Amino acid sequence: MSVKVVKYFHPIPGVAYGNIMWRKSFPMKSGRFPSDHPASPGGGFSDAGSMQCGATGKMPEFRERGYWASCFPEGDGITMQCLKGQDAATAAKDIGEVFGWTVDVERT
């Protein structure tokens, strides 16, 4: 089962991180995501001290667009921050373009 539609909750500065959520869980095993994980097969951290879990797949490309992003260890989503002040529409567009998902915006 692959992820096709995700729910996106835009960050609320100073209150809550943003979240990209899907239904199926792809839990980490020994610090690595399974090969069918939708955002970061394999795993590990992007670099020492960054606390961004998920170093492979589409995660580096998403981060290059100006996001701090870390896969949930349970494998059912990504927590994120917009480092360049992206609004909900821009973030949703970036999520769709990078990961190929249809994005339902839940919080703006």
Image: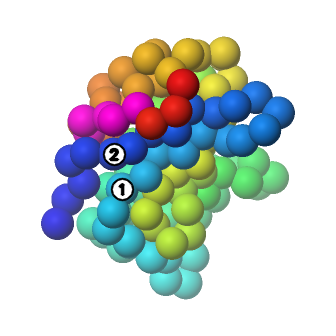
The answer to whether the residues at label 1 and label 2 have Cβ atoms under 8 Å apart is yes
Check disc 2 and report its element: helix, strand or loop: strand
N-terminal of the pair, mark 1 or mark 2, is 2
Residue drawn at (55%, 62%), measured in percent from left and top?
72
- Give the spatial CA distance, label 1 vs label 2: 5 Å
Q: In this view, does 64 lie above or below 35?
A: above
Dominant secondary structure, magenta: strand
> Residue 105, located in which quarter of the rendered image?
top left
Task: Give the position of the C terminus as an image quadrant.
Answer: top right
Q: Can residue 10 be seen in this view?
A: yes
In the image: residue 58, left or right of residue 1: right
* Foreground pick, 88 / 37: 88
Q: What stretch is highlighted in magenta?
A: 101-105
Check disc 1 and report its element: helix, strand or loop: loop
Q: Mark 1 points at which residue?
A: 22
Instruction: Please provide percent x and percent y for residue 79.
Output: 59, 48
| Circle 2 crowding by C-alpha within 10 Å: few under 14, some 14–19, many from 20 | many
Q: In this view, does 34 lie above or below 91?
A: below
Q: Does the magenta stretch include residue 95?
A: no
Residue reaching furthest to the front:
107
Given the image, on which type of amino acid does mark 2 rest? Answer: Val
Given the image, on which type of amino acid does mark 1 rest? Answer: Trp
Instruction: Please provide percent x and percent y for residue 9.
Output: 52, 38
